[in-house]
């Protein structure tokens, strides 16, 4: 698959060489605060995850989010990853996930732009009809980014997740192809 470009980002296929960086991100408590990661991960677990991911259909492979470092236009630096999982071929629906692992790139619009690029790819190239996600009530920054990208709140799964000794609500958000094309 060729690169997918936004105005300030590009998405590329994940490579085995990305595993150490992914491992650093998923073992950072601040990064995984709003993700479904519950235990420390080691190289063996991350390599097993990577191998399993590569057996899924190519449109469900993880993509690395890259941006230009400050003041540079030729170089790219990895700041996170995103993927669809799994694509429902009959309903043309898919869940999307995203992680911005490099904290110095938080709150700069890269998450919103990534979601827009993935929606464009999903609707215009993969002929999806619905892209959806789950976001914790404790993640207002994420909810705001998703709304900016065109996602709407569909409902709340009450106390559906257990994090840090308490139950929290999980919001379901989605964007439909018909909504996307009207933008």
Image: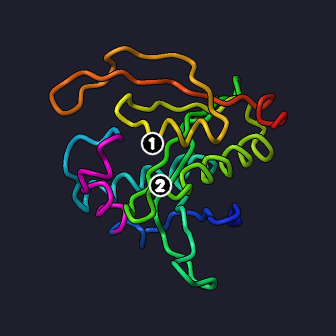
For the residue pair 168 and 38, the one nearer the viewer reads as 168
**Does 174 sit above or below residue 157?**
below
As drawn, is 41 to the left or to the right of 145? left
Q: Nearer the viewer, residue 65 or 126?
A: 65
65 to the left or right of 162: right
Say which residue label 2 marks. 107
Element marked by disc 2: loop
Q: Quadrant of residue 135?
A: top left
Query: Which residue is pictured at 19% across the width and 24% down the height?
Result: 166
Residue 1, compared with residue 117, is above or below; it is below
Q: Which residue is painted at 61% across and 33% down in the image?
A: 94
Give the residues in magenta: 21-34
Q: Is residue 55 something one can see in this rendering?
A: yes
Q: Which residue is mark 1?
A: 141
Q: Residue at x 56, y 27 (%)?
A: 173
Q: Which residue reaches farthest right?
A: 182
Magenta-drawn stretch contains 25: yes
* Residue 67, image x, y percentages: 56, 70
Q: Provide the major secondary structure of the magenta segment.
A: helix
Q: Could you say which quadrant of the image residue 66 lies in?
A: bottom right
Q: How many angstroms separate mark 1 from mark 2 (CA)?
A: 8 Å
Tag 1 near tag 2, CB within 8 Å: yes
Residue 160 numbered tag = none
Expressed as whole percent of the image width and height from the top left, the position of residue 28 reads 25, 56
Q: Is residue 154 magenta?
A: no
Q: Quadrant of the N terminus?
A: bottom right
For the image shown, how many numbered marks are present on the structure? 2
Task: Give the mark nearest the N terminus, 1 or 2.
Answer: 2
Residue 144: percent from left, percent from top: 52, 38
Q: Residues within 10 Å of mark 2 (few under 14, many from 20)?
A: few
């Amino acid at each position: 698959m060729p690169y997918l470009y936004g105005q300030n980002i590009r998405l590329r296929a994940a490579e085995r060489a990305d595993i150490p960086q992914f491992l650093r991100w998923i073992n950072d408590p601040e990064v995984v605060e709003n993700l479904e990661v519950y235990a420390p991960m080691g190289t063996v677990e991350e390599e097993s995850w990577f191998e399993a991911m590569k057996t899924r259909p190519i449109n469900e492979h993880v993509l690395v989010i890259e941006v230009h470092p400050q003041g540079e236009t030729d170089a790219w630096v990895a700041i996170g990853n995103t993927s669809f999982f799994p694509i429902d071929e009959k309903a043309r629906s898919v869940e999307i996930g995203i992680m911005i692992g490099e904290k110095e790139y938080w709150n700069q619009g890269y998450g919103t732009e990534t979601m827009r690029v993935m929606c464009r790819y999903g609707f215009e190239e993969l002929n999806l009809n619905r892209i959806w996600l789950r976001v914790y009530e404790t993640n207002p920054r994420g909810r705001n980014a998703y709304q900016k990208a065109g996602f709407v709140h569909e409902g709340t799964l009450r106390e559906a997740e257990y994090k840090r000794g308490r139950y929290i609500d999980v919001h379901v958000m989605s964007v439909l192809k018909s909504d996307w094309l009207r933008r």
